[in-house]
Image: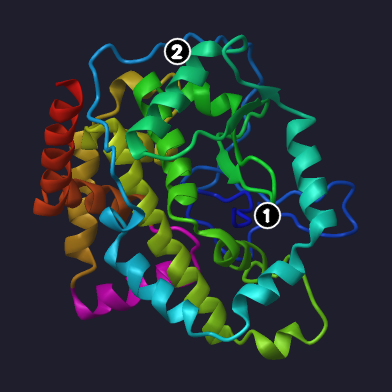
Amino acid sequence: MALVPPSALWFPQRPSSLDFSFSPSNASIFVASRIGFGAVKKRERKSFFFRVTVCSAAPVVFHNLDADDFRHPLDKQNTLILRVIPGLNDLGKAILGSVTEQIMLLENIGTSVLVSENQLSSLHQLMLEAAQILNVEAPDLYIRQSPVPNAYTLAISGKKPFVVVHTSLVELLTRKELQAVLAHELGHLKCDHGVWLTFANILTLGAYSVPGLGSLIARSLEEQLLRWLRAAELTCDRAALLVAQDPKVVISVLMKLAGGSPSLADDLNVDAFLEQARSYEKASSSPLGWYIRNAQTQQLSHPLPVLRAREIDEWSRSLEYRNLLKSALQMNAIQKE
C-alpha cells in the first residue's frame, strides 16, 4: 500500500499556513490540517455523544468499481504529468522513512479511540457500508478528541491503513454527511494517491527540508503538485457522492465546513449555497475575475468550497454518473437473483 500522509481532505489550505507541522524537532511528527474553509475558531470542548445509525434504505453497491470509473479528468491529466517527472516516487519515499512512519502511526493510535464492533459500533458500520459501496477494503477507524473538525487518512507501509475523525466533526455532521466524509477518505485509498500526496503535503508546505532539495523542487513543480492535489480532492468528492448517492448530502458537508456550526445547522440551505457557487462562477468569468480567481486558488491545496459544490452538483447530473448508477443497479439485481 502506498504511503498516504494525513491530509486536509476538505480544507483549502495555503502553503504558508501553520496547520501542517512536520519537523524532526517536534516531540511528535504529525502531518494534518483542519477541515474547514476559512479560519476556524476553537470552541469550548463539550461532551460528545455518538448516536449514529446506518440509513435504513439499501444503497446501491458498486461491485466492480474501478478508480478510473470516477476519477476526475483533472486528476487524470495532472497524474500523467507527475508520472513523467523522473525520481519523484523515490524522492518521496526517501523523505518519509520507516522511523517517520512509525512515529506517525503511534502518534495517531496512541491518542484516539479505535472504532470496532464493540466500540462505537454504529460508526464502525458506517465505515463498513461505505467501503462495501466503493468496492475497497475497509481501513481501521479512529475517533480523536479535538475541537477542530478534521478527518484524514494514513497508510503506513506494510500496515493496515486507517482513518482518523475528530470528535467535533461528528458533532457537526449528520450520519449521512459523516459517512460521506468517510467515503471521501476511502477515495484516497481507492485511487492510491500515495507518495504524490506526501509530496504535496510536505514539500510544498515548506515543512520539511532535504539538503539540495531547494534546487531540485522549483516553484513550477510546487505549483504542479498543488494543482494535482486540488484535482485529487475533486475525485474524492465524487467518491463521497457514490456513497451518499445524494449530491445535497456532499454539498451540505462542504457548506457546513465553510460556515456552519451545530447551532446553525438547521438554518443552513443547500440550494442557497449552490446559488452562491453559481454567483462566484459568474463573477469570476470576466478577464479580471479570471485573473483574481487564479491568484486566489493558485497556492491552495484544496479547491474553494463553492467550486467543489458546483463540481459535485454538475457531476451528479452527468451521463457518466447516471451510467455508473445504472450499471451498479443492474449488477445488484443480478446478485439478488
Up-down: is 58 above or below 194?
above
- Considering the image in quadrants, where does the C terminus appear? top left
Please report contact status of discs 2 and 1: CB closer than 8 Å, yes or no.
no
Residue 236: say if magenta. Answer: no
Three-letter amino acid code of the residue under disc 1: Phe
Q: Estimate how packed mark 1 is, as few (under 14), some (14 to 19) or many (20 or more) residues with alpha carbons within 10 Å.
A: many
Q: Seen from this angle, which residue lies furthest front? A: 337
Q: Which residue is mark 1?
A: 20
Up-down: is 69 above or below 148?
below
Give the residue at x 48% y 8%: 51
Looking at the rendering, which quadrant does residue 100 occupy? bottom right
Residue 101 percent coordinates (x, y): 77, 52
What label does residue 167 carry, if any? none
Predominant SS along the magenta part: helix
What label does residue 52 carry, if any? 2
Give the residue at x 68% y 54%: 20
Give the residue at x 37% y 39%: 135
Give the residue at x 50% y 77%: 223
Q: Is residue 289 left or right of residue 264?
A: left
Q: What colour scheme governs how the chains and residues are painted in the rendered image of this protein?
A: rainbow
Residue stretch in magenta: 286-303
Q: Is residue 213 left or right of residue 232?
A: right
Q: Estimate how packed mark 2 is, as few (under 14), some (14 to 19) or many (20 or more) residues with alpha carbons within 10 Å.
A: some
Residue 182 percent coordinates (x, y): 46, 34
Counting residues from the start of the chain, the first of labels 2 and 1 encountered is 1
Residue 302: say if magenta. Answer: yes
Q: Is residue 27 left or right of residue 15?
A: right
Looking at the rendering, which quadrant does residue 295 occupy? bottom left
Residue 74 percent coordinates (x, y): 32, 68
Three-letter amino acid code of the residue under disc 2: Val
Q: Can residue 251 be seen at all in this image of the molecule?
A: no
